[in-house]
Amino acid sequence: MYLLDNPVRRYSWGSATLVQQLLGRPVDGRPVAEVWMGAHPDDPSTADGGGRRVPLDVLVAAQPEAMLGRRVLDAFGPRLPYLAKILAAAHALSIQVHPTSAQAEAGFAAEQARGVGQGDAARSYRDRSHKPEVVYALTPFELLSGLREPEQSAKLVAELEVPALDPLVAVLRGEPAEVAHRGALTWLLGQRANSATWVDAVAESARDGVGARPELAVVHDLAARFPGDPGLLAPLLLNHERLEPGQALYTAPGTLHAYLRGMAVEVMAASDNVLRAGLTSKHVDVDQVLTITDFSPRLTGFLRPERVGPGVVDFRPPVADFALRVVTVRAGEELAGPADGPRVVVCTEGEAQVSAHDARRLQPGEAVFVPDVEGPLLVSGNGTAVVATA
């Protein structure tokens, strides 16, 4: 069992309080957006086993069968197939979408053939992997995920009473729904160079309507944070949702989404393929966003918890790369975590003792990596542990 020293990402959208309070560290005014817990080569955790410190990706590559187990090694090769994070947002991340495996393979090969460097800001595909995601809320967590029915979006946009948006309303009222949404996103992405006038008008209309619809409050907030960005209409095109602590949501490849605020454990395939569509100063690859987005209207992908037993809940997305088990123990209890495979365990409240071949007592925000070779995992103490596994 290896105690993890996890890298911190201080993006501007991060919270200046949430992660610090979880970890019991001083609040110094600096944002912490993400804490990475895994073996992603861009920023791997450092694994500490008996005083020997080594990057987790190096450890896995050196002993792949012991670390991963034969089942995971055969399926994914000698790498940890997922990345876990603590994510804490004070305000909106970019509107983004992730590719399927086939789209990632094709996109990566095409950029390699064109000679687009891995460090190039215009690079869209950093690797050949899909990037499905799950977020498990630790606080109330607000987000946009998946496209509404286009007629509903058309009504919301029309209620703004901004004449410059009449073409968008007309496109949304086309048929069928997938064609309507593709046309709407194409129109919206085409406005990035000349939207300032109508964006200001939308901001004023949303300000006047705050209180009537929760989506308008989000539009108004986005207008202040991203002046001139047509992506501020996203809350009217996407489903606007709020997770309560203990709820989880699955984001499939092809799903437009944006996280708005709150703290969660996020687990994803070990990929850095992010294509942005708005609310960002970074590169927007219009052609690829339109290529990989699933334009079918759909409800938000809430994951139904599977109750394994008292205090033990599983969240299983429809992919093999990762799953989550949440174990909540009270004094005197000892409950089962996943029995095999590579496991990243993070304590999210109270105190959790994680036991396999070795044992570690974890405080909030502390994490360990438990390799397959250590066998079945048990959790005791008085707190909650979130376990990511393949």
Image (cartoon, grey):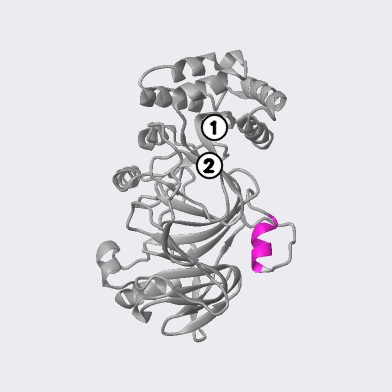
Q: Answer yes or no: is residue 29 visible.
A: yes
For the residues labelled 2 and 1, the Cα–Cα distance comes to 9 Å
Q: Is residue 203 above or below residue 225?
A: above
Q: Amino acid at mark 1?
A: Ala
Q: Residue 186 versus residue 386: which sits nearer the camera? A: 386
Residue 223, position as x, y percentages in the image: 66, 32
Q: Is residue 179 left or right of residue 74?
A: right
Q: Amino acid at mark 2?
A: Ala
Residue 29, position as x, y percentages in the image: 74, 57
Q: Secondary structure at mark 2?
A: strand
Q: Residues within 10 Å of mark 1 (few under 14, many from 20)?
A: many
What residue is rendered at 50% in x and 33% in y? 238
Q: Which mark is residue 200?
A: none
Taking the view exactly as shown, the residue that stands out farthest to the front is 310
Q: Which residue is mark 2?
A: 258
What residue is rendered at 63% in x and 33% in y? 214
Please check the rendered image and state whether residue 31 is part of the magenta-colored stretch, yes or no.
no
Q: Which residues are magenta?
A: 16-23
Q: Is residue 335 above or below residue 9?
A: below
Q: Residue 308 versus residue 107: which sits nearer the camera? A: 308
Mark 1 and mark 2 in contact (Cβ < 8 Å)?
yes
Q: Where the N terminus falls, by quadrant?
A: bottom left
Where is residue 149, by image quadrant? top left
Q: Is residue 292 left or right of residue 75?
A: right
Q: Is residue 74 above or below residue 63?
A: above
Q: Main secondary structure of the magenta part?
A: helix
Residue 366, position as x, y percentages in the image: 57, 71
Q: Answer yes or no: is residue 187 visible.
A: no
Residue 68, position as x, y percentages in the image: 34, 71
Q: Is residue 49 left or right of residue 12?
A: left
Q: Secondary structure at mark 1?
A: helix
Q: Which residue is mark 1?
A: 234
